[in-house]
Image (cartoon, coloured by chain):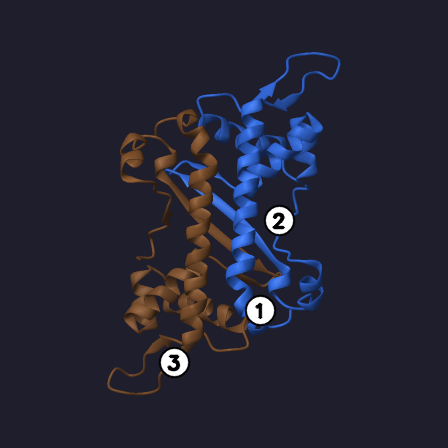
Chain colours: A brown, B blue
Amino acid sequence: MNGKAKRRVTGAKAKEARAASGALAKAELRVRIRFGEEFQLGPGKADLLDAIDRTGSITASAKELGMSYRRAWLLIDEISRLFKRPVVDRAQGGAQGGGARLTDFGRALLAAYRRIEARTALAVREELAPFETDFIDL
Amino acid sequence: MNGKAKRRVTGAKAKEARAASGALAKAELRVRIRFGEEFQLGPGKADLLDAIDRTGSITASAKELGMSYRRAWLLIDEISRLFKRPVVDRAQGGAQGGGARLTDFGRALLAAYRRIEARTALAVREELAPFETDFIDL
């Protein structure tokens, strides 16, 4: 999943075709979970963890998501401080000058967030379906 | 529900007591649904519709939520333009100088959004439960 892609609330193919011009067919979700005043888990951090998992590099992930290295580092730092166990593992040295990868814990956490998104997308689809014809065409 | 209150991700009483110091017990949700570039349905508009339903007044609702009348009016305008049917009904004249109330459609829409929030809260609780002891204490 690329960083700009939000969770698209899509239905079955036939339904999609029928509602293609309606607003509901274009619905995108953002689920943000706040933990106290200081911590958040939302689509930005999830996409960053996703990118690190794919690229093995904070630099490459930041570039892919159109953010500065510093911004990416701060997001990783925030998510890391929320947990007692490491989320991202920074490899030392090597030919590539060190990389980064998700720990098994980080990968499980990301998967849980994606399941939350998917369940919310299903809820949106089901709960707003009765209003489908009430939306304007976008 | 007051405007400052986010959807709290609470569990059963016993579990809550056990996890009271953990971050998961303090989790709050924000579910935002985007329709194309221009429209959003999120906790801000939902809380405003809630307040209008309770107070029967845009002025009182804006005050309760700590926003300007103009801001409240713009939010109502945005949500109204997303649908073919009226969401808020502005009463004309009368002793109170005119009020506002949700239409049946607006009330049904708000209820659907609250159900989406509740289902997401359940998903958060269930999907993050395996990580409960991994969160720091907040």
Would you say A19 lies left or right of B63 here? left
Q: Is residue B106 above or below residue A95?
A: above
Q: Which mark is residue B6?
A: 2
Q: Earlier in the sequence, mark 2 or mark 1?
A: 2
- Of the pair A11 and B2, the residue shown nearer to us: A11
Q: Are marks 2 and 1 in contact (CB under 8 Å)?
A: no
> Which of the chains bears the disc numbered 2?
B
> Which of the chains bears the disc numbered 1?
B
Q: In percent of the image, x 64 and y 22: which residue is there?
A: B100
Quarter-wise, where is residue A101 in the image?
A: bottom left
- What amino acid is at disc 3? Arg
Q: Residues within 10 Å of mark 2 (few under 14, many from 20)?
A: some
Real-space CA distance between mark 3 and mark 2, rounded to the nearest whole angstrom? 35 Å
Q: Residues within 10 Å of mark 3 (few under 14, many from 20)?
A: some
What quarter of the picture does the N terminus of chain A occupy? bottom left
Q: In percent of the image, x 42 and y 65: which residue is there?
A: A110
Q: In percent of the image, x 71 and y 59: which residue is there?
A: B13
- Secondary structure, mark 2, is loop
Quarter-wise, where is residue A104 in the image?
A: bottom left
- Of the pair B71 and A36, the residue shown nearer to us: A36
- What amino acid is at disc 1? Glu
Q: Position of residue B22 (x, y in %)?
A: 64, 68
- Secondary structure, mark 3, is strand
Q: Which mark is residue B132?
A: 1
Residue at mark 3: A90
The number of callouts visible is 3
The nearer-to-camera label among 3 and 2 is 2
Q: Which mark is residue B57?
A: none
Q: Residues within 10 Å of mark 1 (few under 14, many from 20)?
A: some
- Secondary structure, mark 1, is helix
